[in-house]
């Protein structure tokens, strides 16, 4: 007997947490599975938030991990990733999630935490999942719409403290403040709040730029004066140290939307996923569950 399964992609952020809550309330725990794709560099407090939510829901969370961190992915592909090119989303989130879905024989509805600020993404996401035989729904668009700040819902209704990155002013809660898609404002928040993380990525970028092909690339870009140019983390740090009057919120207005999740199924390489797997027989189809801890940004320094 086939049983409809409702699968929620839980990123350990606020939107996906409210998504889980809504799906459980509508369909019941027995029909729901919560799945978390671990990039291995989430902030430690995100894992605390996940554990608090797990206790609230009294449900297990299936954790999938490809095994590498984003920066190991970039080093393996010999690139300096940025807002324009970030294969980490595909390799560490989309590919493990799709591989996991393919092991499920029951009909599946995937629930993704888009709200009205991301409604423009729904059509493409739905089309791409439907093409592979899976239904998609967006519980944050269900009525009644939640108009309160999600942090307030979690803090006051659930009595759970949100991930600390929100309180520190980040525009997102991804990858421990070293997401390559974030803008200058969030990078400076990492410099202020997690200087050791900033230093580690600054050193990584410097080593990667010491190469004739990569020397003109950087994680961050400078868009001042209407021109776009690479802005190495070393230069960004030096600018900040020379002028502490920098308005981080003003820099946020120049940042791209930091979206990183399984909704971006239209990745150009996804249609070649079967061929890609065939070329890598050493990579398992089913991904192993990881422990809830935060290892280093990357295990090995990048080579040239």
Image (cartoon, rainbow, N blue to C red):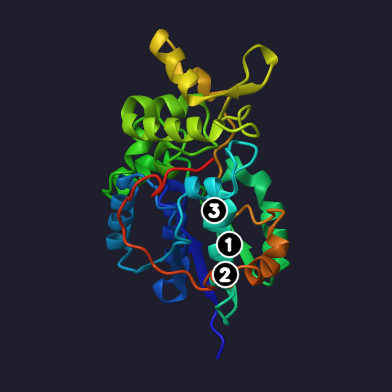
Q: Could you give the CA–CA distance between mark 3 and mark 1, rounded to whole angstroms?
A: 31 Å
Q: Can the viewer see residue 244?
A: no
Question: Label 3 belongs to which residue?
Answer: 143
Residue at x-position 59% and y-position 66% = 98
Image position, residue 265 (x, y; %): 65, 57
Q: Nearer the viewer, residue 65 or 256?
A: 65
Horizontally, is 84 left or right of 161 in the view? right
As helix, strand or loop, the secondary structure at mark 1 comes to: helix
Residue at x-position 48% and y-position 25% = 233
Image position, residue 25 (x, y; %): 42, 64
As helix, strand or loop, the secondary structure at mark 3 comes to: loop
Q: Could you give the CA–CA distance between mark 1 and mark 2, rounded to whole angstroms?
A: 6 Å
Q: Residues within 10 Å of mark 1 (few under 14, many from 20)?
A: many
Mark 3 or 1, closer to the camera: 1
- Which quadrant: the C terminus? top right
The image quarter in which residue 34 lies: bottom left
Q: Taking 71 as reference, is 250 above or below it?
A: above
Horizontally, is 138 left or right of 241 in the view? right
Which mark is on residue 99?
Answer: 2
Q: Nearer the viewer, residue 278 or 192?
A: 278
Extreme residue toward the bottom, this view: 1
Image position, residue 221 (x, y; %): 59, 25
Question: Label 1 belongs to which residue?
Answer: 95
Cβ atoms under marks 1 and 2 closer than 8 Å: yes
Q: Can the viewer see residue 73?
A: yes
Q: Taking 149 as reference, is 183 above or below it?
A: above
Q: Could you give the CA–CA distance between mark 2 and mark 3, rounded to whole angstroms?
A: 32 Å
Mark 2 or 3, closer to the camera: 2
Image position, residue 89 (x, y; %): 56, 51
């Amino acid at each position: 007997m086939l049983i409809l399964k409702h699968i929620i992609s839980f990123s350990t952020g606020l939107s996906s947490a409210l998504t889980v809550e809504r799906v459980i309330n509508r369909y019941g725990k027995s029909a729901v599975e919560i799945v978390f794709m671990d990039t291995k560099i989430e902030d430690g407090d995100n894992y605390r938030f996940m554990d608090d939510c797990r206790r609230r829901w009294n449900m297990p969370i299936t954790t999938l991990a490809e095994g590498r961190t984003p920066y190991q992915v970039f080093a393996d592909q010999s690139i300096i990733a940025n807002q324009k090119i970030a294969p980490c989303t595909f390799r560490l989130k989309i590919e493990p999630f799709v591989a996991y879905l393919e092991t499920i024989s029951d009909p599946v509805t995937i629930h993704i935490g888009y709200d009205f600020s991301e409604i423009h993404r729904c059509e493409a996401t739905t089309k791409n999942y439907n093409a592979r035989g899976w239904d998609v729904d967006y519980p944050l668009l269900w009525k009644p719409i939640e108009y309160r700040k999600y942090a307030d819902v979690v803090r006051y209704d659930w009595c759970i403290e949100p991930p600390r990155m929100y309180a520190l002013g980040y525009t997102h809660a991804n990858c421990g403040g070293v997401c390559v898609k974030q803008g200058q404002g969030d990078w400076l928040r990492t410099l202020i709040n997690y200087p050791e993380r900033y230093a580690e990525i600054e050193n990584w970028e410097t080593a990667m730029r010491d190469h004739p092909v990569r020397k003109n690339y950087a994680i961050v870009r400078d868009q001042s004066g209407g021109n776009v140019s690479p802005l190495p983390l070393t230069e960004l740090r030096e600018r900040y140290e020379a002028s502490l009057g920098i308005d981080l919120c003003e820099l946020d207005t120049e940042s791209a939307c930091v979206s990183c999740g399984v909704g971006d199924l239209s990745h150009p390489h996804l249609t070649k996923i079967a061929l890609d797997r065939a070329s890598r027989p050493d990579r398992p189809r089913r991904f192993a569950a990881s422990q809830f801890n935060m290892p280093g940004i990357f295990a090995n320094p990048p080579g040239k």
